[in-house]
Amino acid sequence: MIVLVTGASSGIGAAVARRFAREPGVKLVLAARRADRLEALALPVPTHLLPLDVRDRHAVRAAIEGLPAEFADVDVLVNNAGLALGLAPAQEASLDDWDAMIDTNVRGLAYVTRAVLPGMVARDRGHVIQLGSVAGTYPYPGGNVYGATKAFVAQLSLDLRADLLGTRVRVTSVEPGMVSGTEFSDVRFHGDSTRAAGVYEGVQALTPEDVAEAIAWCALQPAHVNVNRIELMPVAQAFGPFAVRRT
Ligand code: NDP
Ligand code: 8X3
């Protein structure tokens, strides 16, 4: 089984790489911008490193088309690269932050999907697993464009199922709640590590390994089973607040 993980240099993506490395016969293709972080994973299975910015559609296509023959027939794509930037209300949010989220979570995820799918369809085998988020279902203050990008991921996953009907290619949207032990909040708050740490203070959040286990479970189902979506949260989290303004 050849597993391609985007955003494997950190957090959930790195945990997914480590989880699949435990399966017999797995070969990994690990993509991210920080090649040194990919190298540092040093997993004990055949691995091809793919330094890649998913926002660059030409680079994505060239990278997938240029995979060495022994890594080219990707069985599982874990489309995990993504980020949140900022938590400001929409009327104050940074357009640069919005662009970066749309370019990465929407365009980048679509580019990688588009590059990998033809091979999967030609082989009549494959599984696209997309990292959505509970933020794509439940709104919260400041979630705005981040949440909307994750709603895109969920809907694209359903629409891919429609296009792929008649093939044996599977599609799953994995939608976690709060996951600690990743760089997610450091990135969201532009390196303000105190504010980032505050997000997880006093909360037993999901771990990257929890999410990786759910992803592996989806991929390891019998070939005729398609898990459409999985939503998981820490017990300590529930659905977003409904804000009521009283006069
Ligand atoms: P991290 O910040 O730890 O990991 C994000 C990964 O995405 C990194 O490996 C980063 O690698 C990669 N990445 C970001 N931008 C690009 C890019 N332009 N090109 C290639 N790779 C990129 O965060 P998480 O592990 O927490 O997040 C992983 C996914 O899970 C994201 O899609 C996130 O939205 C989603 N998620 C996270 C939750 C959480 O609470 N942590 C909850 C629900 C969903 P590099 O910088 O080296 O390029
Ligand atoms: C990450 C989870 O709740 O911080 O997608 O948006 S949340």
Image (spheres, rainbow, N blue to C red):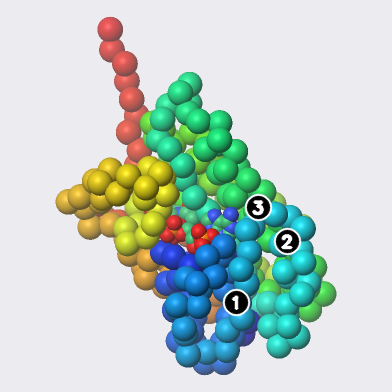
**Residue at the limit of the structure toward the left, as seen here:** 202
Q: Which mark is residue 49?
A: 1
Label 2 neighbourhood size at 10 Å, few (<14), some (14-19), many (20+)?
Answer: some
Quadrant where the N terminus sits is bottom right
Q: Amino acid at mark 1?
A: Leu
Q: Which mark is residue 131?
A: none
SS for tag 3?
loop
Name the side, left or right, on which 178 lies relative to 222: left
Between marks 1 and 3, how big is the CA–CA gap?
18 Å
Between marks 3 and 2, how big is the CA–CA gap?
8 Å
SS for tag 1?
strand
**Residue at the limit of the structure toward the top, as seen here:** 247
Q: How many marks?
A: 3
Ligand 1 within 8 angstroms of badge 2 C-beta: no
Between marks 1 and 2, how big is the CA–CA gap?
14 Å
Asked if one can make out residue 85 in the rendered structure from this viewpoint, the answer is: yes
Q: Amino acid at mark 3?
A: Arg
Label 1 neighbourhood size at 10 Å, few (<14), some (14-19), many (20+)?
Answer: some
Ligand 1 within 8 angstroms of badge 3 C-beta: yes
Residue position marked by numbered label 2 in the rendering: 59
Decide which of tag 1 and tag 2 comes sooner along the chain: 1
Decide which of tag 1 and tag 3 comes sooner along the chain: 1
Return the residue nearer the eye: 100 or 71. 100
Q: Residue at x 38, y 43 (%)?
A: 189
Q: Give coordinates of residue 97: x percent, y percent.
A: 52, 38
Q: Is residue 146 above or below residue 63?
A: above
Q: Give coordinates of residue 171: x percent, y percent.
A: 63, 64
Residue position marked by numbered label 3 in the rendering: 55
Q: Residue at x 54, y 46 (%)?
A: 150
